[in-house]
C-alpha cells in the first residue's frame, strides 16, 4: 500500500488551519501545518510534502512571497502550490500566477472544490515524480554506459575489440592474477640499432608508426593480447584472458603474416640505404597473467619462463624467420611445415633448447 500523500497547510488563523487539516485528514491525507510563511519554509526544508495549501494574507511573508521562494529552490520548484484567499480571486489570480501558484481556492472553502483540486494536483505530482524517477534511472544508465565505454577504451589498448567488449560485459574479474598455459610471441626488428644511428629521429618514428600500425591490426585479427610495444620489439600472447581453440596455430599464423606485411616496408627503406628485417619467436608454457600497474596506468602482463624463452628464440631468429619451441612445434606440426634448427644455446637456459623454424601453414 502506497503511503498517504502529505499536505502542508499554511495559515495564520488557527481555525482555518484546523478546518483544512481535519477535512484533509478525514480523506486519508497526512497533514502538517505552519502558522506563517517563515515556519512554512522551515517545514519545507525539514519535510517533503506533496502539496502546499498556502494562505495569501499573512503577517511577515505573504503567500506570494512564500510561493516565489518555493519556486526559486530547485528542490521544491515543481511542488504543487494552491493559494487560498478571501480576496477577489480575479484580482489575485494574476499575482498568484506571477508568483508561481498552480491553482487557487476562495474562502470560505468549498469542500468538494478543495478535494477536487487537491486530488488533481497530487495526480500531476505523482506523474512528475515518475518522470523524475525515469530521468534519474536514465542518467544512471548513461553514467554506467559512459563508464563502460571508458573501461572499453582502456581495455582496447591491449585486447581485440571483441575481447574488450566481452571483458566489459562479464566484468574485470577476468583480469585478476591467474595461471594458464599460453603461447607467447616476440617480434623484433633486425638492423634497427644501426638504423637509429644513421636515420633522423623523425624517420625512426615514421618506421615504428607504420610497423606498429600493420602489426597491431594483425594482433587484433588473430585474437592476440598485446602485452607491450617496446621500441622495435612487440610481445603478444594467445589463449588469455579468454581461452582459444588453437592458440599455438594462431600465434604462428600471426607471426608469418607479420613477416609478409613487413616486406614492403623493408623494401621501401632499403631504397633509402637501410637494411631492415623482422624476426620472431614463439614459446608455449604456463605463465601467471593479470593486470599490473597502478591507478591511472594499468597493463595486462604475462610473467614466467615462457616469456623469456619466446624472447630468446626471437633473438636467435634471422630476418624473416619465426622460431618456435618444442611444445609449440608439437601443437602445430599437423598444420605447419617445420624445420629443426636446434638445439640452441640460449642465454639464461642451462641446457640447449630444441627449436624449429616455421616456414608455412599448410
Image (cartoon, helix red, strand yellow):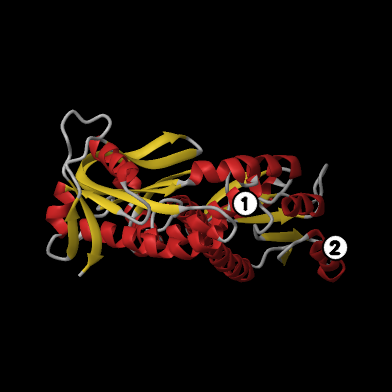
Viewer-side residue, 20 vs 360: 360
Give the secondary structure at mark 2.
Answer: helix
Camera-nearest label, 2 or 1: 1
User: Residue 36 location in percent, x, y?
Assistant: 74, 43
Residue 95 — which label? 2
Residue 147 position, x and y percent, is 49, 52
Q: Quadrant of the C terminus?
A: bottom left
Tag 1, which secondary structure?
helix
Q: Is residue 329 depicted above or below 89 in this figure?
A: above
Q: Earlier in the sequence, mark 2 or mark 1?
A: 2
Query: Can residue 196 be seen in the rendering of this structure?
Result: yes
Label 1 environment density (alpha carbons within 10 Å; few <14, some 14–19, many ≥20): some
Would residue 323 be found to the left or right of residue 277 on screen?
left
Residues 273 and 45: in front is 273
Image height check: is 176 above or below 17? above
In this picture, residue 348 sits left or right of residue 67: left
Report the residue marked by disc 1: 203
Query: How many numbered tags mark residues here?
Result: 2
**Quadrant in the picture for residue 294:** top left
In the image: residue 235, left or right of residue 130: left
Work out whether residue 145 or residue 260 is closer to the camera in this orientation and state it. Answer: 260
Amino acid at each position: 500500500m502506497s503511503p498517504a500523500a502529505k499536505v502542508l497547510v499554511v495559515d495564520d488563523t488557527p481555525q482555518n488551519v484546523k478546518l483544512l487539516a481535519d477535512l484533509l485528514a478525514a480523506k486519508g491525507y497526512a497533514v502538517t501545518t505552519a502558522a506563517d510563511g517563515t515556519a512554512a519554509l522551515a517545514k519545507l526544508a525539514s519535510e517533503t510534502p506533496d502539496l502546499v495549501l498556502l494562505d495569501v494574507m499573512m503577517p511577515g511573508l505573504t503567500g506570494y512571497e512564500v510561493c516565489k521562494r518555493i519556486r526559486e529552490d530547485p528542490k521544491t520548484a515543481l511542488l504543487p502550490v494552491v493559494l487560498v484567499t478571501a480576496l477577489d480571486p480575479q484580482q489575485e489570480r494574476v499575482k498568484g500566477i506571477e508568483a508561481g501558484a498552480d491553482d487557487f481556492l476562495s474562502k470560505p472553502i468549498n469542500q468538494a472544490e478543495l478535494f477536487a483540486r487537491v486530488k488533481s494536483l497530487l495526480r500531476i505530482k505523482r506523474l512528475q515524480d515518475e518522470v523524475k524517477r525515469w530521468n534519474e534511472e536514465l542518467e544512471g544508465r548513461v553514467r554506467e554506459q559512459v563508464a563502460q565505454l571508458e573501461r572499453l577504451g582502456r581495455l582496447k589498448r591491449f585486447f581485440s575489440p571483441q575481447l574488450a567488449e566481452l571483458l566489459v560485459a562479464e566484468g574485470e574479474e577476468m583480469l585478476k592474477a591467474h595461471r594458464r598455459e599460453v603461447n607467447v610471441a616476440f617480434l623484433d626488428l633486425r638492423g634497427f640499432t644501426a638504423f637509429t644511428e644513421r636515420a633522423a629521429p623523425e624517420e625512426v618514428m615514421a618506421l615504428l608508426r607504420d610497423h606498429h600500425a600493420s602489426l597491431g591490426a594483425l594482433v587484433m585479427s588473430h585474437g592476440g593480447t598485446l602485452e607491450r610495444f617496446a621500441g622495435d620489439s612487440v610481445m603478444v600472447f594467445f589463449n588469455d584472458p579468454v581461452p582459444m581453440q588453437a592458440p599455438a596455430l594462431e600465434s604462428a599464423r600471426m607471426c608469418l603474416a607479420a613477416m609478409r606485411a613487413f616486406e614492403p616496408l623493408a623494401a621501401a627503406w632499403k631504397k633509402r640505404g637501410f637494411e631492415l628485417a623482422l624476426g620472431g619467436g614463439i614459446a608455449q608454457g604456463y605463465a601467471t597473467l593479470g593486470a599490473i600497474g597502478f591507478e591511472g596506468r594499468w597493463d595486462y602482463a604475462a610473467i614466467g619462463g615462457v616469456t623469456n624463452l619466446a624472447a630468446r628464440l626471437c633473438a636467435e631468429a634471422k630476418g624473416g624467420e619465426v622460431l618456435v619451441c618444442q611444445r609449440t612445434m608439437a601443437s602445430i606440426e599437423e598444420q605447419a611445415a617445420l624445420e629443426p634448427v636446434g638445439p640452441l644455446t640460449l642465454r639464461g637456459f642451462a641446457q640447449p633448447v630444441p627449436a624449429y623454424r616455421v616456414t608455412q601453414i599448410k
